[in-house]
């Protein structure tokens, strides 16, 4: 029996490998503390869970949902986007609920990429940008991000012949894995680039409400002309601690959203309606939970940064996202450093190379660690010799 070539060439998903390493250590009786995976440990707020409990008892929510989502959810999203970004969307044509942002990111390439087409993919970046392109039969051209350029792509450095072949470009700010943010002026550059080369812009804005020190991340769609060339992904997972409920949305150009909906309606049966009801409660309920979460995460950020600096790593303090991105000492690979930290201190971090070649030399730490474990993890990192 032979599997498809696309599966044969498929690398193991990065976080599956991390989970296996953690399980192996714990099977040996070792107390492992993981900064590896960005899954919020803070619970879903009670008022959101209450909406789920109520909706789950309604027989109307026991049936197949529609792929495009409840009209009430799309309207709640449109209202929230107006309040958060000052953007007006038609909930019928410019908003599409998703079964988590990862699902949407994996499927969107099927809308715009034919076999042999090119997608511009950031390096380092979320692995699903590349994988979705591959599943659609396309080719990823990796656009390097560098510390010197603030982890923004240099659009002028993309070869003209590549830009002219490209059908999509992926962006992600606040950024995973680097924690970098993008100024509004950068999004203006992206719009001009996309118009010139007739490229669809896909901005992954899952971390738009995980921000610190008073910083308020913008939306790509706030840039003038952005709605003419692209769409944007948003997630309930990070904003409202709802990773396990699998719900997100895309917003943007009506023609692009229509193509996206046609693909999705032939692949999935939509989001369970009880979960859509809890999402409505999240959008319409107390938004103060966001600031409360961020205050706790900011405290964790500060402690992690201090611990890494103590052992001599160069660590910019991120303004947003769930991640701290640190440069390992010269002469060490990111995988070697991570392996030594796991072996000596039973602390898991993610090697930057797992996000692409340009991530080599860095490690990523997630702030989604319960406070007691984080305190112990910080102590262990501070004792790490790296030898």
Image (cartoon, helix red, strand yellow):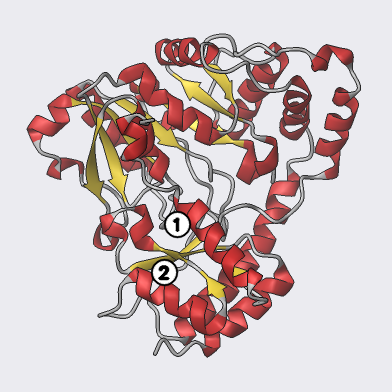
Give how far across and how far down residue 16 sits, in percent. Answer: 51, 52
Give how far across and how far down residue 4 sits, in percent. Answer: 34, 29
Q: Which residue is mark 1?
A: 179
Q: Nearer the viewer, residue 201 or 363?
A: 363
In the depicted structure, whether residue 365 falls above or below residue 383: above
Is residue 228 in view? no
Quadrant of the rendering where the N terminus is positioned = top left
Measure the C-alpha gap from mark 2 to mark 1: 9 Å
Considering only order in the chain, which callout, 1 or 2, is on the residue closer to the N terminus? 1
- Residue at figure coordinates x 62%, y 68% from the top left: 300
Describe residue 80's horizontal placement relative to residue 331 as left or right: right
> Few, some or many C-alpha atoms within 10 Å of disc 2 (few <14, some 14-19, many ≥20)?
some
Q: Nearer the viewer, residue 384 or 309?
A: 384
- Residue 316 got which mark? 2
Contact between marks 2 and 1 (CB within 8 A): the answer is yes
- Residue at figure coordinates x 63%, y 60% from the top left: 368
- Residue 33 got which mark? none
């Amino acid at each position: 029996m032979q599997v498809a070539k696309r599966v044969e060439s498929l690398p193991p998903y990065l976080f599956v490998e991390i989970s296996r390493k953690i399980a192996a250590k714990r099977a040996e009786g070792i107390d492992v503390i993981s900064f590896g995976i960005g899954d919020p440990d803070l619970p879903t707020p009670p008022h959101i869970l209450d909406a789920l409990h109520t909706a789950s008892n309604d027989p109307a929510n026991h049936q197949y949902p529609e792929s495009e989502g409840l009209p009430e959810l799309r309207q709640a999203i449109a209202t929230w986007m107006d309040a958060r970004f000052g953007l007006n969307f038609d909930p019928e044509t410019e908003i599409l609920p998703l079964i988590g942002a990862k699902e949407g990111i994996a499927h969107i390439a099927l809308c715009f990429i034919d076999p042999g087409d090119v997608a511009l993919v950031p390096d380092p970046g979320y692995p699903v940008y590349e994988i979705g392109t591959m599943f659609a039969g396309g080719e990823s051209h990796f656009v390097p991000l560098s510390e010197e350029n603030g982890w923004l792509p240099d659009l002028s450095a993309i070869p003209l012949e590549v830009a002219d072949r490209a059908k999509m470009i992926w962006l992600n700010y606040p950024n995973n894995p680097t924690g970098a943010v993008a100024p509004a002026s950068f999004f203006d550059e992206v719009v001009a680039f996309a118009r010139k080369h007739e490229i669809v812009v896909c901005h992954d804005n899952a971390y738009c409400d995980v921000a610190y020190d008073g910083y308020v991340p913008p939306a790509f769609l706030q840039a003038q002309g952005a709605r003419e060339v692209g769409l944007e992904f948003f997630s309930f997972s990070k904003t409202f601690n709802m990773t396990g409920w699998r719900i997100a949305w895309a917003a943007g150009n009506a023609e692009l959203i229509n193509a996206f909906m046609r693909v999705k309606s032939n692949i999935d049966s939509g989001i369970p309606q009880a979960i859509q009801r809890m999402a409505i409660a999240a959008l319409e309920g107390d938004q103060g939970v966001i600031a409360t979460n961020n205050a706790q995460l900011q405290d964790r950020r500060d402690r992690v940064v201090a611990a890494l600096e103590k052992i001599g790593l160069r660590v910019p303090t991120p303004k947003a996202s769930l991640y701290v991105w640190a440069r390992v000492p010269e002469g060490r690979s990111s995988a070697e450093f991570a392996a030594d930290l796991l072996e000596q201190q039973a602390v898991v971090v993610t090697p930057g190379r797992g996000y692409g070649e340009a991530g080599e030399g860095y490690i990523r730490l997630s702030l989604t660690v319960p406070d007691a474990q984080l305190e112990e993890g910080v102590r262990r990192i501070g004792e790490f010799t790296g030898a």
